[in-house]
Amino acid sequence: MANVQPNEYVLKGGNIAVSYVTNGFQNQPTLAYNDGQQTKSFRGTEIRLLKTEIGSLVSVTTFLAIDTGSTSFSALLPVIELADRTQTQNFKTAGILTNRKGPESFPGTGVRESYELIHMHGTARVVVVPLAAGSPAGTKR
């Protein structure tokens, strides 16, 4: 049997918990984010994925104000191959909180982005994603 890539990554570190499914509802990626102060859900194009030589960088914007700036969360996901669909794999990785200053931020010059590195541990596995509501099992939409 060929190796299988996981489709769910559950990460925890600091006060942040994240669940990322690569092919969630309607085959779109989904990401749930909780930092102890806010809980947010993202799907589809709200989730940005960048494949690099050191893994995949998954990013979401957790706060956005057009005048004062934004905050985003990114996680680096290593390449993982499971022996079969029943296996799980624990791993360590890094999360990054990025704070960006907006055009109305003071002072108007200097460093515009700051980063906070979060040591995270995670579990990767294969999950069965339910079909869209109202779809009979075994049919495609």
Image (cartoon, rainbow, N blue to C red):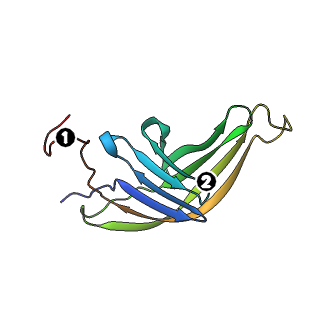
- The residue singled out by tag 2 in the image is 96
Q: Name which residue lies at 30% across and 62% down.
A: 82
- Residue 53 is situated, as x and y percent measured from the top left of the image, at 48, 48
Mark 1 nearby-residue class (10 Å; few <14, some 14–19, many ≥20): few
Mark 2 nearby-residue class (10 Å; few <14, some 14–19, many ≥20): some
Going by the numbered disc 2, the residue's amino acid type is: Ile
Q: Nearest to the eye among marks 1 and 2: give it.
A: 1
- Residue 34 is situated, as x and y percent measured from the top left of the image, at 54, 56
Q: Name the secondary structure under disc 1.
A: loop
Q: Hey, which quadrant is residue 111 in on the image?
A: top right
Report the front residue among 53 and 78. Answer: 78
Q: Name which residue lies at 20% across and 34% down.
A: 141
- Residue 51 is situated, as x and y percent measured from the top left of the image, at 46, 44
In the rendered view, would you say 103 is above or below 27? above
In the rendered view, would you say 58 is above or below 1? above
The N terminus lies in quadrant = bottom left
Q: Is residue 37 left or right of residue 81?
A: right
Verify CB contact (< 8 Å) between mark 1 and mark 2: no
Q: Name which residue lies at 27% across and 56% down.
A: 4
- The residue singled out by tag 1 in the image is 135
Residue at the far front in the pictured view? 134
Q: Name which residue lies at 56% across and 59% down.
A: 94
Distance from the alpha carbon under mark 1 to that under mark 2: 38 Å
